[in-house]
Each structure stands twice: as C-alpha cells, then as structure tokens.
Image (cartoon, helix red, strand yellow):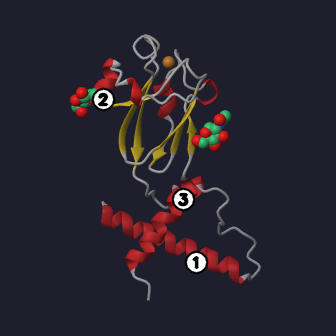
Amino acid sequence: MVSNSAIILVAVAFFSVISAKDFMVGDNKGWTINFDYQAWAQDKEFYVGDKLVFRYPVGVHNVFKVNGTGFQNCIKPALSEALITGNDTIVLATPGRKWYICGVGQHCAAGGQKLLIVVNPAVMSPSVAPSRSLGAPTQDLPATGSANGIALASFQSIMAVALAIFLVIAV
Ligand SMILES: *[C@@H]1O[C@H](CO)[C@@H](O)[C@H](O)[C@H]1NC(C)=O
Ligand SMILES: *[C@@H]1O[C@H](CO)[C@@H](O)[C@H](O)[C@H]1NC(C)=O
Ligand SMILES: [Cu+2]
C-alpha cells in the first residue's frame, strides 16, 4: 500500500515539472529603460521552478538581484554580482518577493528599469494546475475503453485528491 505522503510527493513533483514556465521579462521589449515592469508583472503568476529570462544587448544593461531597500533606492551591489550575458536566466527557487534592477547609469532611478515580483510556492490548487500543463493527458481523451486512458484518468484523480490533502495539511 502506498502511503499518503508518497502520493503527495509524487503529486508535488508532477505538478512542479509540468507547470514550470519561462517568463521573458518585458516580452518583446526585453530588459530596457522606460518600460513599465510592474504593469508587465501584474497579470502574471510566478511559481517556484519558473524562470525569468532577461534579454538585452550585451553591455547596454545588466541585472542585479537586490532586496527591497536596494529596489526602492536603486542601490547597485558590487559589480561582480551583476548578470551580464544579455540572456540572463534566473530560476525562481524560493517563494516570496524578488527584486531586480539594472545597474547601468541611471537606468533604475531615471529609466524605471526595475522589476518586483512575488513568487508563489510550487504547489497549486488542482483547479489551476491543469490549465498550465503542457500537453498533459486529460480526461476528455477519446474514451474508447482504452486501459491507458482509464489509468491516466484515475492517476489524475489521485493527483488531484493528493494535492487537496496536501493543501489542507499545508494551510
Ligand atoms: C539590502 O542589501 C544591502 C546590500 O545591497 C544590505 O546592505 C542591506 O543590509 C540589505 N537590507 C536588508 C533589509 O536586508
Ligand atoms: C538563452 O539562454 C537559454 C538558456 O538559459 C537558452 O536556451 C537560449 O537558447 C538562449 N538564447 C539565446 C538567444 O542565446
Ligand atoms: Cu539598463
């Protein structure tokens, strides 16, 4: 018999893997000045395991991860902490507030080149998770009595129940 905790672990791993998302900061505009990154972030949900990708021409901008004070006052950390590749990928490893600024010139203070996001814990509610899945099997597959289809359907149900249990425990 499989213990509840094992099922929960599988469920967490399952949903973490299928839901991991890459966010291109600023979309087509990338990482630049005079762009409203708060507006960009506002309609997005960030989860642990997702990635931020900062795109910009090398040398024109950079990326610093800072704290709330550094964000508010555009305080640049040591240059050695800067990300400078022009295609900087940051994995969102922990939940909570995350702050990023550009350290070139007055880009942060005068150009508004700063981003604040709030990262949610990896586990999502069962009603949200399936909509973010990438080609995961769903129950509306042709139900031609295929043993596989039934197995997948019940697997999903177990996952949903396990997640529900987990959420109850976690809250
Ligand atoms: C924020 O980061 C700066 C270094 O950039 C540090 O000196 C300061 O103590 C930090 N503030 C908090 C509240 O952690
Ligand atoms: C940017 O980096 C990602 C990995 O973090 C890589 O997959 C992608 O190909 C890179 N894109 C460019 C244009 O370098
Ligand atoms: Cu910049």
Quick check: marks 1 and 3 in contact, CB under 8 Å?
no
Q: Distance between the residues labelled 3 and 2?
A: 30 Å
Give SS at disc 3: helix
Residue type marked 3: Val
Indicate left or right for 19 with 28 as reference: left
Q: Looking at the picture, tell me which residue is in the foreground, 41 or 102.
A: 102
Residue type marked 1: Ser
Q: Distance between the residues labelled 2 and 1?
A: 45 Å
Please tell me whether mark 1 or mark 3 is closer to you in this view: 3
Q: Looking at the picture, tell me which residue is in the foreground, 139 or 28.
A: 28
Residue 60's x, y, as percent? 55, 17
**Dot 2 alpha-carbon crowd within 10 angstroms: few under 14, some 14 to 19, many 20 or more:** some
Query: Quarter of the image holding residue 76?
Result: top left
Residue denoted by label 1: 154
Please tell me whether mark 2 or mark 1 is closer to you in this view: 2
Residue 6's x, y, as percent? 42, 76
Residue 142's x, y, as percent? 76, 72
Query: Quarter of the image holding residue 19?
Result: bottom right
Residue denoted by label 3: 17
The residue drawn where x is 63% and y is 80% is 151
Q: Distance between the residues labelled 1 and 3?
A: 19 Å
Residue denoted by label 2: 68
Cβ at disc 2 under 8 Å from ligand 1: yes
Residue type marked 2: Gly
The residue drawn where x is 45% and y is 56% is 124
Residue 169's x, y, as percent? 31, 67
Give SS at disc 2: helix
Ligand 2's quadrant is top right
